[in-house]
Amino acid sequence: MGATETQRPREGGLRAYLDASPEHGSTTDVVTDALREAILDGALPPSRWLREDELARELSVSRTPVREALRRLSDERLIVRAAHRGSLVAPMTFDDVLAVYLVRESLEGLAAQIAARRRPAGLIDSLSRVHRAMTERAEEGGTGELVRLNLEFHRLLREASGNPYLERFLTQVEHAVRRFGRSTYELPGRVTEMLAEHRAILDAIAAGDADAAQQKAAEHMRRARDARVQGLLDA
Amino acid sequence: MGATETQRPREGGLRAYLDASPEHGSTTDVVTDALREAILDGALPPSRWLREDELARELSVSRTPVREALRRLSDERLIVRAAHRGSLVAPMTFDDVLAVYLVRESLEGLAAQIAARRRPAGLIDSLSRVHRAMTERAEEGGTGELVRLNLEFHRLLREASGNPYLERFLTQVEHAVRRFGRSTYELPGRVTEMLAEHRAILDAIAAGDADAAQQKAAEHMRRARDARVQGLLDA
DNA sequence: TCACGGCAGGTTGCATGCAACTCGCCCCCA
DNA sequence: TGGGGGCGAGTTGCATGCAACCTGCCGTGA
């Protein structure tokens, strides 16, 4: 993987998503991940029709794994299926932004709360390391790597909860959020603000203050939502 | 459907679940719902092996829709798949009970909070009607219908949120909870307690007090968890 | 001009066949 | 007697074929 692939491999490069996939098990899993990444990246934009045999040809597999992948993605609400007509990359509305961040506020708050209470070995170190890396990248100005590190920060947080249900839902929420686009960090001041919010969460967890961790994480999400709304209104 | 089917149609009656399915669209959907209900009911108990071929014969369909159904249920964590070996109804652990109720506390609280704020037309009426029905059934002593009405109460609540993400996650949480068994209402005093908790949520929503609604719903879940734990320890 | 029926093209839904994989068991050998 | 290799039964993974279904279009009749 290159250093700064903020570039969205638009259209046609579907095959690249397949090859980039982390050597999963079954063909169906690989196809599912490839299509999911393509949708989250915007390479397959909302409202685009997906034809089973077109995808199958492009990915060099039969229709069966493609079918199963589409079915799964539809359960994740990333696509919408119409019987005998095809599948459609699910459209995103403004209301979705508000709805998803509302749920995310609750769940990230809960995750941070539990993390502060459990503080599993190595968590503080890992979070600090990611935070430091983000600070360095922020000074350099590129946003591509920041996006990746941010995902990493939140992944650590939800895995620290040790709650499989929470992890699963937060993962799905994150997928929904990624679909809104990557623009947030380009808003003036947002990167600095975000780093401060992460810092606050990290400090609360390190101090073992569960309530503060919950509050700071929830606040982080409210601000992220505001920034997202701002970014969408500007565009 | 009969009046009191607390009976779990154990084993073999898989076909009944198929026929009971509400006339869904595709074969795959019907099969998915049938298998899901069978698992939630306990007709297909944890750790039971599921053979595609066997299920297909029993449901009089080919392996394809069964395959797709199994894949979906595995995404919902209701079954676990092992490559080339088969699928297994996912085992349930005691930790799952605690984990799932922790998430549920957050999400039901959020749903009640939003419901109190939005108060969509007819919500109070519907909730009251269900609550009244539950009170009546409670006096008669049967628990089967109570279970159904309770599901209805919580369904109304999450649908009142108008938040598709919240609705989806709460539905999945409810599925997980149903797997723990139906025993809660047989604990002495639990039914009365539960009715009081529902009443408190209902009153808070009717009064438009969002914070109270959130608190009461969260408390309801903590108590439900305790009752569940109690029931499992007794058994 | 408009409404309606039917036909054709395109797409998925489901069934089935074959190859690949897993695992238990037996046999062989040390 | 114990360990290891390999064979065979059982099961899924994926490919492919055919039928059903949906839609848009064209022609017909009022």
Image (tube, coloured by chain):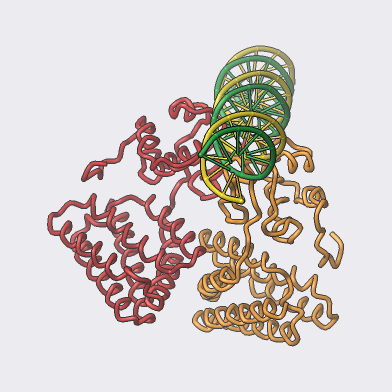
Chain colours: A orange, B red, C yellow, D green
Please tell me whether residue B143 is drawn above or below residue A151 in the rendered image. above
The quarter holding residue A176 reads: bottom right
User: Viewed as shown, does residue B197 lie left or right of B88?
Assistant: left
In which quadrant of the rendered image does the N terminus of chain B lie? top left
Query: Measured from the top left, where is residue A205 in percent x and y?
Result: 58, 79
Q: Outermost residue, left direction?
A: B140
Please tell me whether residue A122 is drawn above or below residue A22 in the rendered image. below
User: Viewed as shown, does residue B57 lie left or right of C10?
Assistant: left
Please tell me whether residue B225 is drawn above or below residue A142 in the rendered image. above
- What residue is shown at x 64% (from left), y 66% (from top)? A155
- What residue is shown at x 80% (from left), y 62% (from top)? A8
How many numbered marks are there? 0
Q: Is residue A215 visible?
A: yes
Query: Measured from the top left, where is residue A25 in percent x and y?
Result: 69, 42
The quarter holding residue B41 reads: top left
User: Viewed as shown, does residue B20 lie left or right of D29?
Assistant: left
